[in-house]
Amino acid sequence: MKKSQTYKEKTLCFLMLISFCPLFATPFSDSDASWNNVLKNNFPSDYLASLNKDYLRKYTKVVIKEKNSQSLQTFTNSIGIEFILIPAGEFNMGCNYNDFYCDIDEIPRHRVRIIKPFYMSKYEVTQKQWVKIMGYNPSYFQGENHPVERISWDEAKAFIKKLNKKEHRKNYRLPTEAEWEYAARGSKDDSKGIPTKYYWGNKINKRYAWYWNNSNKSTHVVGQKYPNGFGLYDMSGNVWEWCEDSYDESYYLTSPKNNPINKKFQNYKVIRGGSWFNQSKYLRTSNRVKISSNLRISDDGMRLVFSP
């Protein structure tokens, strides 16, 4: 196990000193009954519609898709963002002690319960979707179906506020760290029930993620790699994804079991998933990184959650 957050912080500081680095450059012009039933995922087929009847009637079209013999309940909102129902459940959050790259902020591995189901966007928010709400495109790697990037946590929150206002709702938000890791894992454990390093297994696989070795130093159109067990794409690589939580290196020592979210420290927020710019160790599902809420980098983007 390597030591602390120091390497991550030094890497970020180094990047900030490189004025020509595209991470900080200006854009160029180009163009998610009972507790037992919940754990067993025993949802009625009309679950989504019954929870969001008024919303769905006005803004969305419900689509039921079959994948790997499991029903994925999805809807698409007014600006084309597709959402997938993520069932409630329990999982092991954090890294395995035998993982060489396990950081001190990823331990101890602990049991977390997600009490209620939620919807998570199938893909990272695209530039086209961002422009529909915000009216401008901050991205360095421009392309309407590429993930929006160079957005701060504050700007992501502003996007969500405007989207909620547009649809007369309060349901859109950023995922909590726990929700993000739960959804990213996609129910993937090894044969002994231990969480795998990546959501597809314990070895890096280029078929699942865009990262330093295959990205050609750029973002890519969302959804080009294989999805995880919940049907979510690009949960590792392409761009980092903002979480709602403030960062605390030792949070796992005291975090609650049910729906944990850290709001104690306000200046630094958590990003998850790794990006096109990172080596494979940053794509690990348990990996946590802190950055300032007002920082804008060309490998930082977002993914939405919709709460029923």
Image: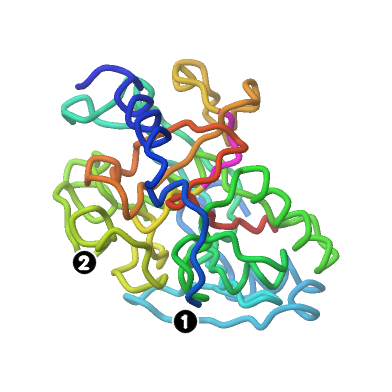
Magenta segment boundaries in residue numbering: 242-246
**Exactly how many numbered labels are in the figure?**
2
Circle 2: is it few (<14), some (14-19), or many (20+) Cα within 10 Å? few
Q: Amino acid at mark 1?
A: Lys
Q: Locate residue 12 relative to residue 216 in the image: left or right.
A: right
Q: Secondary structure at mark 1?
A: strand
Q: Amino acid at mark 2?
A: Arg
Residue 32 seen in the figure: no
Q: Position of residue 270 (x, y in %)?
A: 51, 35
Q: Which quadrant of the rendered structure holds the N terminus?
A: top left
Q: Position of residue 6 (x, y in %)?
A: 33, 20
Q: Could you say which disc has been placed on residue 207 in the image?
A: 2
Q: Could you say which disc has been placed on residue 1 in the image?
A: none
Callout in the foreground (1, 2): 2
Pick whichever of labels 1 and 2 is earlier in the sequence.
1
Residue designated by label 1: 65
In magenta segment, residue 244: yes
In magenta segment, residue 181: no
Q: CA distance from mark 1 to mark 2?
A: 23 Å
- Which one is in front, 290 or 138? 138
Looking at the image, do the residues carrying marks 1 and 2 touch, with CB atoms under 8 Å apart?
A: no
- Residue positioned most to the front: 20
In percent of the image, x 44 and y 64: which residue is there?
A: 141
Q: Which quadrant of the rendered structure holds the C terminus?
A: bottom right
- Which one is in front, 112 or 102? 102
